[in-house]
Image (cartoon, rainbow, N blue to C red):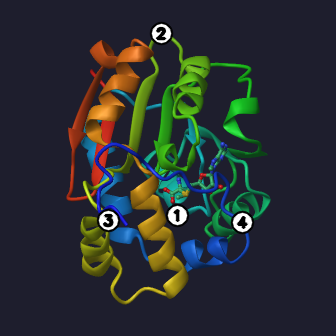
Amino acid sequence: MLDSLHQFRFPEAELMEGEQVRAYADADFSLSHQSIIDTLSQVLGTKHIPESIVDLGCGPGDMTSRLLTLFPQAKLLAIDGSVSMIQYNQSFLEKRNQTKHVSFLCSCIQDWIPYTSYDLIFSNSLLHHLQDPFVLWSAIQRAMGENSFIFVCDLIRPESFSQCEVLVNRHAKDASDILKNDFLNSLMASFTIEEVAKQLDCVRLANRMKLVQISDRHWMAHSLI
Ligand SMILES: C[S@@+](CC[C@H](N)C(=O)[O-])C[C@H]1O[C@@H](n2cnc3c(N)ncnc32)[C@H](O)[C@@H]1O
């Protein structure tokens, strides 16, 4: 097998279903998730408090809950194409008494037509699940108003399969086999920073957004303020 992921990604299934959902929901992503939320808070500062948020590919709730803790007054729409993810998310937020301003939508983002624009368009770890990355960028364009703030994070595809294995051993050594396998598949399915930069260029967001590497395995792209 060629040990190179330099040119190609290996897409994985879009929606997370079955045993994958429980493994992901039970995993502890608190450090990386909170660091993303802290960065969002720093970039937005105190002047830009969103009143409406959409969380694209919201997953089982940990990230949605952190967004609501940061912006407790905001109305939030949590979207995921997986029924079990939406169910997990709803019960996660119910346990924390955080559902007051939240709507849940089980839909693939490619089928979603927003009725309104959102002050904050947020997505973590969704892009690498998509066969076609423009599904995310066009959903973002549909949800954008003049003053929307876009904040997207995801994994970076390493240059080789062996580098993927190094990252799995570094960050998920003690995780379950399902989670380790998911992480490996996700790394191989993700995009390089150069590919994300080209995508932003194609949808004419490159000059409105800053794209940076934030860890050995993540990039972040957010609107310029
Ligand atoms: C890796 S999880 C990330 C979940 C959450 N954002 C987080 O940070 O923990 C990716 C999520 O995107 C969802 N997803 C994948 N493709 C989707 C699509 N086309 N439309 C909506 N949701 C999708 C999956 O079902 C899964 O819940």
Can you identify the residue that label 3 sits on? Answer: 161
Q: Position of residue 39 (x, y in %)?
A: 27, 46
Q: Are the residues at dot 4 and dot 2 in contact (C-beta closer than 8 Å)?
A: no
Marks 1, 3: nearer the viewer: 3
Is disc 1's CB within 8 Å of ligand 1? yes
Mark 2: secondary structure: loop
* Residues packed near mark 3 inside 10 Å, few (<14), some (14 to 19) or many (20 plus): some
Q: Which mark is residue 146?
A: 2
Identity of the amino acid at label 3? Phe
Q: Are the residues at dot 4 and dot 1 in contact (C-beta closer than 8 Å)?
A: no
Q: Which mark is residue 62?
A: 1
Quadrant hosting residue 141:
top right
Mark 4–mark 1 Cα distance, whole angstroms, equals: 17 Å
Mark 4: secondary structure: loop
Which circle's residue, 3 or 4, is located before the other in the chain?
Answer: 4
Mark 1–mark 2 Cα distance, whole angstroms, equals: 29 Å
